[in-house]
Amino acid sequence: MPDEKRIGRVPGTQGYAEQAAELIPQYESIPFTAHHAAELHLLPTAPSRILDIGAGTGLDAAWFAAQGHTVLAVEPTAAFLAAAMRLHPSPLIEWLDDALPNLDAVMGLGQRFDVVMLSAVWMHLDEAERGIAMPRVASLLAPDGVMVLSLRHGPVPAGRRMFAVSGEETMALAGRHGLVTVLNTHTESLQPGNRAAGVTWTRLAFKHAG
Ligand SMILES: C[S@@+](CC[C@H](N)C(=O)[O-])C[C@H]1O[C@@H](n2cnc3c(N)ncnc32)[C@H](O)[C@@H]1O
């Protein structure tokens, strides 16, 4: 089971444990196909290996599993990991307590993945952490794999650790680590409260160059 003592030591998770009871139903309320409409066409249809980093309540992991994919779902916030395991049990999902930027446990597995999901997590890392994380996540992507990354823009929720990260700097960083951009869109938030507050999203996808 996740270790409560780790909360606060993982950069980016600040505020999530305290707000988990309210956030869990919110995360569960938006279907995968709506949340990820922009990148659906890039996702594999044949059974594949998925890495979901910052998996939250496991809604995305559950969708991938329902499509027949095997999923490694990584989540450092204990309350989310426990909810995910309870809400979305599946023999195709392996749950793991690990965190960006180092992803030591994931890196230690020595595996590569056809899809690497970084949905609504990258802007929780500061510039130095993003610089550590990018070559690591790039190295986890299989040669023909796709990495999906979304960035939240706008007001930062109280108590949360979030940085203003642009799509341009993220594409440039990815490019320095051998990734090319295959998707770059900007959308408004699907959550009514966030949309009203002016939250928007950049949705990016990357593949290995060449
Ligand atoms: C906004 S939620 C997104 C959840 C889910 N990926 C989604 O798109 O609905 C951000 C998630 O990233 C996790 N997170 C925060 N910092 C992290 C880090 N350093 N490494 C991995 N996950 C982190 C949080 O615990 C939370 O579950």
Image: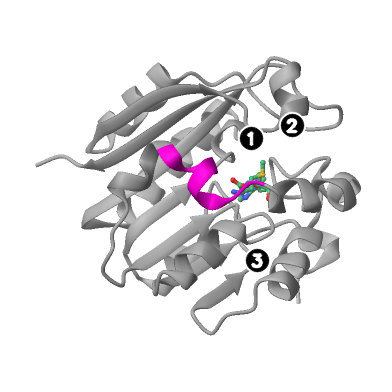
Quarter of the image that includes the C terminus:
top left
The circle drawn on residue 161 is: 2
Residue 180 is drawn in which quadrant? top left
The local secondary structure at tag 1 comes to helix
Q: CA distance from mark 3 to mark 1?
A: 17 Å
Query: Could you tell whether 154 is left or right of 177 in the image?
Result: right
Q: Amino acid at mark 1?
A: His
- Chain-order first, disc 3 or disc 2: 3
Q: Which residue is the site of mark 3?
A: 97
Q: CA distance from mark 3 to mark 2?
A: 19 Å
Residue 109 is drawn in which quadrant? bottom left
The local secondary structure at tag 2 comes to loop
Residue 184 position in % (x across, y down): 35, 26
Badge 2 vs badge 1, beta-carbon distance below 8 Å: yes
- Chain-order first, disc 3 or disc 1: 3
Residue located at (69% from left, 40% from top): 12
Residue 134 position in % (x across, y down): 41, 40
- Which secondary structure dominates the residues rendered in magenta? helix
Residue located at (60% from left, 56% from top): 55
Is 90 or 12 nearer to us in this picture? 90
Label 2 CB, ligand 1: below 8 Å? yes
Q: Amino acid at mark 3?
A: Asp
Residue 133 seen in the figure: yes
Q: Which residue is the site of mark 1?
A: 124
Query: Could you tell whether 27 is left or right of 61 in the image?
Result: right
Residue located at (30% from left, 39% from top): 206
